[in-house]
Image: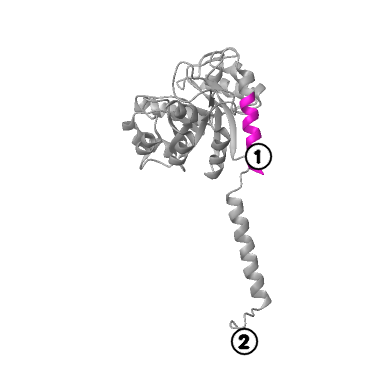
Amino acid sequence: MKKLQFNLRDGSLPLCILSVFFSLFIFNSQATMAQGKLHPDDWKLGIQAWSFHLNTFAEALDKMKACGVKYVEAFPPQEIGAGIPGTMDYHMDAATRKKVLALLRNKGIKMVSYGVVNPTKESDWIQLFKFAKAMGLVNIVSEPEQSQIPFISKLCNEYKINVAIHDHAKPTRYWNPDIVLAAIKGASPRMGACADVGHWLESGLNPIECMKQLKGRIIEFHLKDENMKGAGPDFHDVPMGQGVIDMAGIMKEMKQQHFKGYCFIEYEYHFENNVQDVKECVAYFNKEREKLLK
């Protein structure tokens, strides 16, 4: 067999070896670019049903469909409607669950998350997870007692369902990201944060800095913009991009963190007639996402 020789001193390398090095360089460059690229399906936009809580769940779904979204986060006390008795409480029986799933299919909207819900007993947590499994949920949103977290963590792993800890404004239990991180330390990777950017602002926090603190542990978002900084009687939601929160910066940070998951618009103002405001939020989100896809 002829021995392959090349001279390192004069810088000469066989063409085949140069080709291999070049191919590896191109492959690594493309892989690095792909890691930072945002794909259209990475962020799935939905609406928190609380935005339309003055309506039945069925009526809320119609409004969501008019807003152009395909996903909903339900909340327990809302009446179901459409001739189905009862509320969206997780204690509903199997027959009611079947009717709700049929309603969702008929409206063309998928229920993927549920909350905010705070069972107090382990038996209720088990029932909640069974409900979530039966309904095909991905996330449960809660503000549980910290003593419950080890038990909830086990259920997350057993049922393969996430629990996102929600932040309401100060002085509620999880208003600060530091508290959330301390609570879920050592828990299942399926436990993380439901990042409500409006409540962070209301608590006097910087939403983008809060996101950075929670990097890698954000399960979903509650997106909203606000008319002013800080709490007060005049503090309220406005369409995204029209308030004081840097919503474009929020979405850039989502991309920077390689976030993949559900983003729910939660519009907590003009409840009697807020469909147009919510539509503007949807349009803003889609416009900014398109910019980040480029």
Which mark, by number, is residue 3? 2
Assess disc 2: are there few (<14), some (14-19) or many (≥20) residues with their C-alpha within 10 Å of its C-alpha.
few
Which stretch appears magenta?
280-294
Q: Residue at x 46, y 28 (%)?
A: 201
Badge 2 or badge 1: first in the primary sequence = 2
Q: Residue at x 59, y 18 (%)?
A: 60
Residue 283 is a magenta residue: yes
Closer to the camera in the image, 154 or 169: 169
Q: Give the image quarter of residue 174.
A: top left
Can residue 188 be seen here? The reply is yes
What residue sits 47% from the left and 27% below the top?
131
Residue extending farthest to the right is 15
Q: Which residue is mark 1?
A: 291
Marks 2 and 1, Cα distance to the nearest angstrom? 55 Å
Q: Is residue 263 above or below residue 84?
A: below
Residue 230 x, y percent position in the rendering = 45, 24
Q: Which amino acid type is shown beneath numbered disc 2?
A: Lys
Looking at the image, residue 39 lies above or below residue 242? below
